[in-house]
Amino acid sequence: MKKSISICLAALSFALIIGLLVNSCAKIAPAFTVKSSAKSLSALYLTFADGTGGFSPDTSASNDSAIIIRIPWYYPDGSYTQTSLDSLIITGSIPNSSYMSPAFGLTNFTTPKKYTLTAQNGTKETFTITVVRTHSSKAAITSFKLNEANINGVIVGDTVTIPYAGTTLTGQTATVELSNYATISPDPTISRDYSNPVQYTVTADDGTKVVYTVKLGMPVKVAKGISKVTMLWSKSAGDLSFTDYRQISIAVSGGYFLLPVSNEWVSGSQVQYYSCKTGGYAGSLNVTGVERLYAIANDSMGKVVGINSLYAGNNVCLYEWDNVTAAPKLLAKTTDWSSVGGAFYGRKISVYGNLSGDAVIMATTDGTGGGGVNNILKWTVKGGAIVSQDPEVITYPVAYDYVAKAVPTGPESSSDFFFCSNSPSFMTYVNGTSHAVEYSFSSNFVASPRGNTPALTWFTFNNASFAAVVDASAYSSALHIFDVTDPSVIGTSATSANYSSFHVFDGSSSYVSCPDPNYNVTAEIAVGPVSADGYTMPVYFLVTNGGVVAYELSCVQQ
């Protein structure tokens, strides 16, 4: 009997399947019978076989079938280890319906390689990729100091200005730092009279020459804001030994930037720190007693604050470090889980002010779109002491998914704050007292947005206020800076006539690619202190799975 039932059921099932197939074929919409012709190549990226390095094409790969990728003659930068073309890893993004032949991966590029991308409909596009080794063309003076007078020069373009009130400055030797592999003539260590302008010629490794003039004077600041943004260095995920999806936050303290390895599934904590000047590894933070640290941020004096994750099982905890060599201190521990409503938290944290004085710390939970509770957690610090172990809880009125960040703009509990969400993508300016949204960034805040906004950082520099924003996709991310001194301009669109005064830095040309796609689309920004002379300020841009880029803002009149 059982066998007969099985046969009958099998026959019935077969009949039903045939019927469904027939009916399905009859009902296919005409649009779905057309095969895709998509065969674009994007996010092209080249690394060395060990994963270090990170190089993108000279031109847009999606618009040019002849692609040139340049790699340095020596790597890492500053070493004399020569690179080679015979063992490089090439990655890129192609449409799901297409295929590449030969496949990307470990490749010998001692000669140009042809790749054929075939669309679903059979049409083809051929790309020729040529990799070229190049000597450095950088011929820059990066720092200049008169030793006997103990005066640092201010470098603007090809001029070094010595901020000196007098008219005579004799018997001076100079300590000069140059871009890697460059040389300088004449010898600056020989004593000279700088009362009148002195010229130096800097020669790059490829022979490029730049003549610098060193003169006495006082550099002039622009009245407000930023005059120039310079990229200091760029380190790839391989250079920094990233683990996929684990580097999601960054902080700056005393000449170092810090990157936690965020992993909610593994007990303990790990934070590594690196030189702000070179990006080189410098050490590991003391995390004794800190369970599952997730995200970190820094205050105005370089103190670091971090937050644990739900899986630490220790209620919501904030930890504090005075510097990179200090032991951690427990800053706050909630009395229960009510502030997070059982939701995951700690993906983002931010701080404004001085943790030894007055400050505001803000963190977020996952949103209702991700099964969370849309909560913003806010702690206030007064006179170096946290006001309450339990945070004020603000429920953001618009649903978001996982990655969201709240950013205070002042050290008071009533200070206004920014809020950004990665999915859905939006950025707002929120009243600190009523918690009402006052202004929103346009969806067209850049001309061609990648579609995600995982991070926003607010800061002040040279009498102006700025929002540094990440425009991101799973494959690449770029940093943009907006002048928000007047919050009412926050909604300015890329098509507006006033856009250029709002969008003061476009980092699209120095975007960071992800050799392993960053499907969580996470990134972060940290700012260091303004220089003692008030002329410059560093900004560090982290892309998960991608790397870190260091920029320097200047307010010296160019």
Image (cartoon, helix red, strand yellow):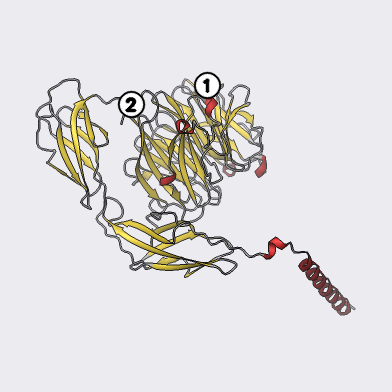
Mark 2 residue type: Gly
Disc 2 is placed on an element classified as: loop
Residue 6, image x, y percentages: 85, 76
Q: Nearer the viewer, residue 515 or 273?
A: 515
Q: Residue furthest right?
A: 1
Residue visible at 36% across and 39% down in the picture: 256
User: Is there any visible trace of residue 326 in the rendered image?
Assistant: no
In the displayed structure image, the side of residue 350 where residue 176 appears, left or right: left
Residue 300, image x, y percentages: 42, 28
Residue visible at 26% across and 47% down in the picture: 138
Residue 514, image x, y percentages: 47, 53
Residue 224, image x, y percentages: 39, 24
Quadrant of the drawing holding the N terminus: bottom right
Quadrant of the drawing holding the C terminus: top left
Q: Which mark is residue 548?
A: none
Quadrant of the rendered image containing residue 367: top right
| 102 in relation to 261, above or below | below
User: Which dot, 2 or 1, sits closer to the camera?
Assistant: 2
Q: Which mark is residue 412?
A: 1
Q: Nearer the viewer, residue 89 or 276?
A: 89
Residue position for label 2: 534
Mark with earlier residue (2, 1):
1
Disc 1 is placed on an element classified as: loop
Badge 1 density bin: few <14, some 14–19, many ≥20, Cα 10 Å: some
Q: Nearer the viewer, residue 96 or 117?
A: 117
In the displayed structure image, the side of residue 61 where residue 164 appears, left or right: left
